[in-house]
Image: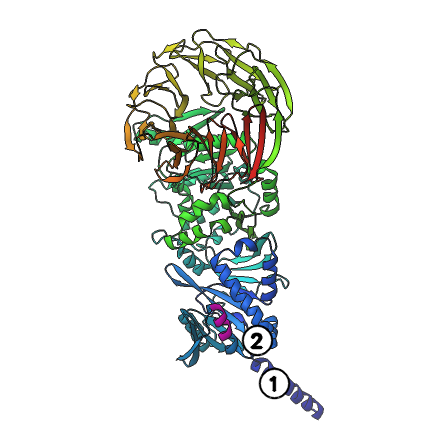
Amino acid sequence: MKKPEWIFVIVLILVGAYFSYRYFAKPEKFVPLQMVPRSAVIVYETKDPLEIVSSLYESDHWQDLKSIDAVATASGVINNIDSLVSKNPSWEKALVNNPILVSLHVTGSESSGFMYFIPEGNGTRELLEELLQNYAGTAVVKYGSREYEGVMVHQLKAQEIEISFINYKNYLIISTYGYLVEDVIRNINAELADNFTNSNSELLQVPKLEDDDGNLYLNGPLLTTYFNTLLPALQPVANELSKSLFLDMSLSAEELFLSGFLFEKKQNDFAGVFKDQEAGTPGTLRLVPENAALVMTLSLSDVEQWYEKWNAIFPVNSTDTGSGNDFIKYTQGDLTLMTFSSNIKDKKDKLLIVKLSDKEGMLNFLNRKAETIATQKSDSVYFEQYANHTIGLIDKGEFVSEIFGSPFEGFSTSYFMLYDNYLVIGTSAERIKKWLADIEDDYVWGRLPEKNSFINEKLKEVSFAVILNNPRYWSLARDGFNKKHMNWWQKNEKALKQFGMAYYQFTNLDNRFYSEANIIHQPQMVETGQQVLEDVYLSQLTNSLMVKPKLVKNHNNGSWETFVQDSSMQILLISNQGEILWQDSLNAKIATEIYQIDYYKNRKLQYLFATDSAIHVIDRNGQYVSGYPAAVSGGKIKHLTLIDYDHSKNYRFLITDHTGNLKMFDQKMNNLEGWDPLALKSKISDQVYHVRVRGKDRIVVGLENGIIDLKNRRSEEQKGFPFDLAYNLTSPLHFEVGSTFESARFTTVSSDGMIAEFDLNGKMYARNQLYQPSGTVEFTMVLDPAQNEYIIARQDYNRLALITSKGDVIFEKDYQSGNLLDVQYYSLGVDKQLYIVRDTIEGALYLYNKDGSLINVDELYSDYPVSVIYRQSQAKCYIYSAFDQSLEVRSFEY
């Protein structure tokens, strides 16, 4: 080889050796996230904490957040840091140019703690001491130190507060838990090989937004461990969502928005179940009622493949393992589970909607299952016709969870119905009936503009999503925590309820899981006590009113109008603006309740009522329906009950007279067999109505002497009845619908406070005496208009106490007049009640919130019980009152 060639080869080798040395000898770039030990559950990373805090302070929701003790404390610390940093330029420079990390760690079976990784500047210890002095409110800060595995651990203590910190690579690592700092030291001594990202290296590879408000890194398995610190010890969660998650954080005035990716590790990760499944928009979401508290929805492309994986991580506890596969083969990949909360503790309704691929196949499968179970129980198969649908019953506890496993638990009974191409399963027939009413009233998400937009914008492509309607879900969430955390949530209820909607979802995109969470600030009206009520309208009439204003719905536009009668026997319809739409002479006083009915089954509504000798049906233009008014012979009409046995709009009119007779007519006013008349030979109270249990109809008739009678459709007496309360019936009867005649219960209270509870078989279950503060006390049961709940009013001369169904006093008030008081009770939502007290002589009205605080500053008067409309979308309550010659509507925020 020629000399120049040798020289070239040598130079090439030397250059290669130099660059190889530079490459292999070059120190790896230090990643601050590697300081965080493996024990971290969540790590928050930000490069501009002071700017983020400033944005938070300027947001709408800061006023709510800062009322929480922990947030207020953190805010105070941040303000102190901000003040101290402004005095130390080197610290300010360090904070801006380097990321700050905050990590969350599990510290006990019910506790967790934080660690802070803060870039150092000059004068670190002095700044910490000053910060601790300001925070602890003392000038005495004690310093100490100890050595752990060759690293000096510094300690500062002021009063009961102690912090430990170490210095590493220009970072200050701080915690109030010394053993968390020791975790960091062990990680450092292991050359950062025992760190948070060691088993979650994918979190370092994710592209990050530069102009967001920070990054969140989550350790999937430890996230489950952390969640269990919030739950009762006997109710742990075992399944993991995923191996790890990364989320970019974006904070605005209205919401906290998180977006990123989750990484599944193995098939039995929750997210792994959705691998190879194409995402979609769940149509079942559009059928969710507005009042659902918790919603879980799934969208799948291959149901049978998904079900095999799902069943592996949520195995069913059943000997009938084939039912799940049989069920699944008739479905499409679109199902939504809903949970509803209630003011009644421990009452939790659920509804499952599943889109079907084979309606007939599913119906045959469910019918066979129902027949098999009924045969095993030596019972008949339950089916009920309602609103032109058939409701059936799988009379077996946890039938749904025997198909889908533990996430679908809670169906102690499973009523089912087909609706178009969907299967609807509810915990009770009543829950399904309420859902049908919501569909009819356009009160479901797909027909509510705000909720429909939410689905289109946020959940257009989704594999799995959980949605919380926070104000409605509140009681369920609170009661689900262990005692320690339940107390914290209860204490901060008002602040946390201001965040109305929250959701989490992930979407399979070519087997990469895009993940998204959102917490939306939707201020709720905080009950602050007295308010000045807003005037909506005042209608001055020629004559005074003689009946309670009846709110009726305009079937053309859905607005609320008012139907009244004045002292000249004129009936009037008044618009929602206070204008008289029409008036006509009736020549008799309305003697009964006023109902709205769909006489022609065309969604156009008419008004039904009775005078003392006739039944009237009038359309919304004031014109009589053909055949009305219809005269009724015999005694004067006292009470009118509208009955629609199966919600098919084939109406029955049941009337009672003052001599103790009952008559029933169809809507063509034909007398019905057995009711022409049915003579009970005793004065009948106003407690006459229809109930239905397991598809069987019963007419409840309460007599003033305390005898309760029960009849079937043909007026035949039922076993166990007549039933004698052994006291005069002076209060309403409350009926709690049950799945059997034994579980369906009646409750009432005597004037002297004796509570009686009995079932549809005439069996007495309880007779309890309420506390009587004196011999002159009077007790009355007060039903919510929906008749799902009740309270008890106890009046002793000028003192009134309102009592829950459990016997607990809600509040007590004194009134100067000593007149008889009329009480109305409205349950306007979970944890939102309205109590109205009216002086029956002077007409004065008192409105109280759930805490017993008086709402109305101004004096209010009404000659009759008021009517109330609550518009949740406006967070406003409207009160309709009639006093002298005026109809007045006022509103207040609630």
> Is residue 130 magenta-colored?
yes
Amino acid type, residue under disc 2 in the picture: Lys
Name the N-terminal-most of marks 2 and 1: 1
**Front-most of 204 and 158?**
158
Residue 497 lies, with reference to residue 658, above or below; the image says: below
Residue 110 lies, with reference to residue 179, above or below; the image says: above
Q: Which residues are magenta?
A: 128-135
Mark 1 crowdedness (10 Å alpha carbons): few <14, some 14-19, many ≥20: few
SS of the residue at dot 1?
A: helix
Disc 1 target residue: 17
Furthest residue toward bottom: 3
Disc 2 target residue: 29
> Where does residue 371 sit, x and y in percent of width and height?
36, 29
Furthest residue toward front: 816
**Front-most of 483 and 716?**
483
Q: Nearer the viewer, mark 2 or mark 1?
A: 2
Furthest residue toward top: 633
Would residue 218 be found to the left or right of residue 394 on screen? right
> Where does residue 836 sit, x and y in percent of width and height?
47, 33
SS of the residue at dot 2?
A: loop
Would residue 822 be found to the left or right of residue 760 on screen? right
> Magenta part mainly helix, strand or loop?
helix
> Where does residue 78 sit, x and y in percent of width and height?
54, 66
* Residue 21 visible in the picture: yes
Tell me the quadrant of the picture where the N terminus can be found: bottom right
Residue at image x 50%, y 67%?
197
Residue 41 lies, with reference to residue 273, above or below; the image says: below
> Where does residue 391 sit, x and y in percent of width and height?
44, 28
Amino acid type, residue under disc 1 in the picture: Ala
Residue 517 lies, with reference to residue 33, above or below; the image says: above
Number of numbered discs present?
2
* Residue 294 visible in the picture: no
